[in-house]
Amino acid sequence: MTTTNKRVAIYPGSFDPFTLGHKLIVDKALMLFDKIVVGLGENVNKRTFMPLERRKDIIRKVYAGDDRVETVHYDTLTADFCREHGIGFIIRGISNVRDFEF
């Protein structure tokens, strides 16, 4: 993952499943950033519907041929992952008022 001189953002989440709403957020973010890292974080307290590899495959197929979107899995804090990879921005979607307040 090379981020030199690029505006790179991470869009963290479980993406279980990756929805049209998630895709819309990534597509809109591509207007602002050179690269979007869709980061599948690991939450041991959350039971998933689909296995990790299936979720990664779905996202990769949606953005096949677009090298501005990269799908990765990480098991550290998002801030630590960003620091380690030189990512300067975090994208978050807001589903409801509770998300906004958080």
Image: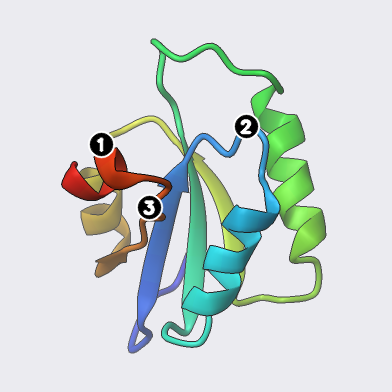
Extreme front residue here? 97
State the residue position of label 1: 77
The CA span between labels 2 and 1 is: 19 Å
The CA span between labels 3 and 2 is: 16 Å
Residue 61 image position (x, y, % from top left): 82, 56
Q: Nearer the viewer, residue 85 or 58?
A: 58
State the residue position of label 3: 94
Considering the numbered disc 2 on the image, is that residue within a helix, a strand or a loop? loop
Residue 36 image position (x, y, % from top left): 49, 68
From the viewer's perspective, is 80 left or right of 96? left
Q: Residue at x 59, y 62 (%)?
A: 70
Residue 15 image position (x, y, % from top left): 58, 39
In the displayed structure, 29 sits above or below 78; it is below
The quarter holding residue 18 reads top right
Q: Mark 2: give few (<14), some (14-19) or many (20+) Cα within 10 Å.
A: some
> Residue 16, labelled with which disc?
2
From the viewer's perspective, is 99 left or right of 42? left
Q: Mark 1 belongs to which amino acid?
A: Leu
Which badge, 3 or 2, is on the more N-terminal residue? 2
